[in-house]
Image (cartoon, rainbow, N blue to C red):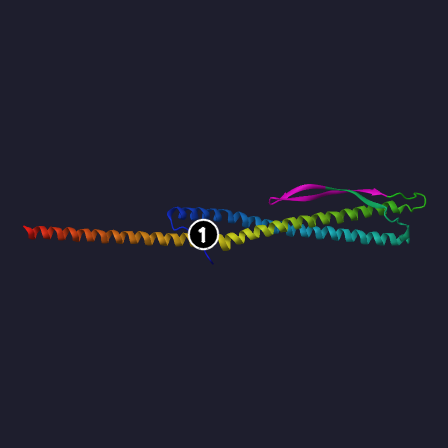
Amino acid sequence: MVLAKIKLTKNELKVQKDALKMYRRYLPTLTLKKQQLQSEIRTIEAKAKAVRKAKEELEHGFRDWIAVFSEKDAFPDGIITVSNIRKGKGNIAGVDIPVFEGADFSRGDYDFYDTPLWVDIAANHMEKAISLDLEAEVLDEQVRLLEAELMSTSQRVNLFEKVKIPETEANIKKISIYMADQQVSAVVRSKISKRKIALRNAAVSETEVYSL
């Protein structure tokens, strides 16, 4: 790991210690958010799968039901159109997501006399199937948004765990060792200086004795 160039000073040591404290404070929060997002994504994916299964079962029953009447061609094409998709807003782990609240449909014109009575019932079933399909699509959108946030959160967790915290700890160690060495050097220089002064004073005193 290549460390960024830092100042080997007391002030820089404080900056690095404050930064380390911040990283360690936010890392658990980010890790918890990551876990929450992963759990929510799994839950929503399971719900989307269940919704699609319900749609398939509805359509399967619908096809079997129509087959009983042997009138497949009697169901008008384009009889149902989606006129409006109603969506609300939700929030998961700080992420704004769309929430499916229902759909409004328009019925095409058809001759009530020439069209079998079961067509209206079939149209209702089709609306339910389309609603389930639209709900699944909104759930897919929720997953996409949460996965994007999960990627961003995971990158931050990795940045803190594998880069910022180790780098800051190394900086603190480097500065601390340097300052300790400087302190030892200062003590040694002080002792040497005192010894020189003592020797000089001793030499002066001896000279004064001889001169007497």
Task: Determine the residue located farthest toward the right in the rendered image.
Answer: 113
Point out residue 110 in the picture as x, y percentages from the top left corner. 90, 44
Which secondary structure, mark 1?
helix
Q: Few, some or many C-alpha atoms within 10 Å of disc 1 (few <14, some 14-19, many ≥20)?
A: many
Residue for badge 1: 168
Q: Nearer the viewer, residue 2 or 101?
A: 2
- Region rendered in magenta: 87-107
Give left or right: position of 55 versus 190.
right
In depth, the one of 208 and 98 nearer the eye is: 208
User: Which picture quadrant has residue 89?
Assistant: top right
Q: Looking at the image, which residue is at 81% across and 42% down? A: 105
Q: Position of residue 88 (x, y in %)?
A: 69, 41
Q: Is residue 165 above or below residue 82?
A: below
Extreme residue toward the bottom, this view: 1
Give the x, y percent position of residue 93.
Answer: 60, 45
User: Farthest front residue?
Assistant: 211
Apparent side of residue 4 relative to residue 78 in the rendered image (left or right): left
Residue for point 41% across, 52% down: 172
What is the x, y in percent for residue 101? 72, 42
Residue found 69% across the figure and 49% down from its top: 141
On screen, residue 178 versus residue 148, left or right, reads left
Magenta run includes residue 1? no
Secondary structure mostly taken by the magenta-highlighted segment of the chain: strand
| Front residue (pair 124, 159) | 159
Q: In this rendering, would 136 be left or right of 75?
A: left
- The residue positioned 39% from the left and 54% from the top of the image is 174
